[in-house]
Amino acid sequence: MSHATSDGVAAAHYIKDVFPEVGSYTGLNQNYAFGQDSWRDFDLSMKVLAPAAKASDKPQFPKIFAGQYGSEISALSLDNAELVHSSFWGGDLEGFIFQAGPRGLFDNKKVLFTVGGTAIYRLGKKLPDGVIIGARGPYGILARGVKTPLNEWFIKTYVDRYGMYPADPAYQYAQGVLATKIAYDKARAAAGGFPGPDQVIAAFKGMTFESFSTTVTMALADGHQAVTENAFGISQWNDVEGEPGLVDVRFYPAECVNPPEGVTSVDWIEKGMQGAKC
């Protein structure tokens, strides 16, 4: 899958496209590399794509797995920022939602979860409507509308076995397994027998393949890092189907939200995302 920069860039594009009136934003991200980098990439991207919006000088960085977020919720509520960006996932994400909801945070702020897809099926109606949801790519609930035989097989097989729809991590792991199979098949055909590790690595390099919900291209890091499109939508409970749903879904091409080969994420964003094809 793509590295995390595409999450921040796509999120900033989504705010620019769907909520251009947002004039200020803050963050709630874990105090380790993923959380810090997620906030950095979103903040830098907003400065390029929505320069009139002002970043808060008090973004929150609680410890991973802290569990209790009362002080952070208070700080976010007192902050004048209109939008809260968060890369929370797993127990941190669900704990924050349960604690912030009763205190009215979702009523008073726009909230954007770049990894929100991990919780949307588990929480069901407990997830407030109107939350901006990402899934670290076009996965989980953002993949439900992809009508390909492979994706429809994957969804049906997963639901039959586990009794719920596959969230984004299920797609990401399955995508890794599929990529490995494709690379081994390619390497075996070239080798005329079972391939060795170097032959499989060579087969992976620069490979493009159709996964369950999107096209994957090994485009960065000299052909060893995947890129895909990215997507966001807004949570809205579907009363007709009795299940979670998204509205206002937007997809952003891989060439729009990932830096080109040989350029670091920070340099690319700070220089105006040169070469981006959106």
Image (spheres, helix red, strand yellow):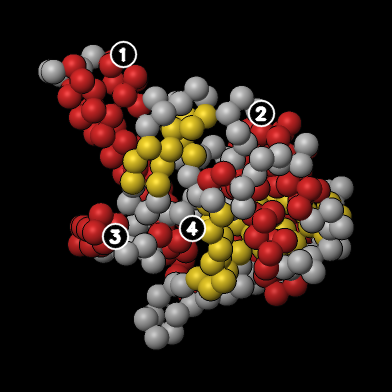
How packed is label 2: few (under 14 Cα within 10 Å), some, or many (20 or more)?
Answer: few
Q: Earlier in the sequence, mark 3 or mark 1?
A: 3
- Spatial CA span between label 2 and label 3: 34 Å
Residue 51 percent across, percent down from the top left: 84, 53
Residue at the farthest left position: 193
Indicate which disc residue 117 carries. Answer: 4
Q: Earlier in the sequence, mark 4 or mark 1?
A: 4
The residue beneath circle 3 is 148
* 231 relative position to 31: left or right: left
Quarter holding the N terminus is: top left
Residue 211 percent across, percent down from the top left: 33, 47
Q: Is residue 54 visible?
A: yes
Residue drawn 38% across and 80% down?
A: 242
Q: Earlier in the sequence, mark 2 or mark 4?
A: 4
Q: Nearer the viewer, residue 220 or 170?
A: 220
| Three-letter code for the amino acid on which mark 3 is drawn | Thr
Indicate which disc residue 264 carries. Answer: 2
| Three-letter code for the amino acid on which mark 1 is drawn | Asp
Residue 214 percent across, percent down from the top left: 40, 51
Asked which secondary structure carries label 2, the reply is loop
- Spatial CA span between label 2 and label 4: 27 Å
Camera-side mark, 2 or 4: 2
* 135 relative position to 190: left or right: right
Residue drawn 81% across and 48% down?
A: 47
Residue at the farthest bottom position: 240
Residue drawn 18% across and 23% down?
A: 188
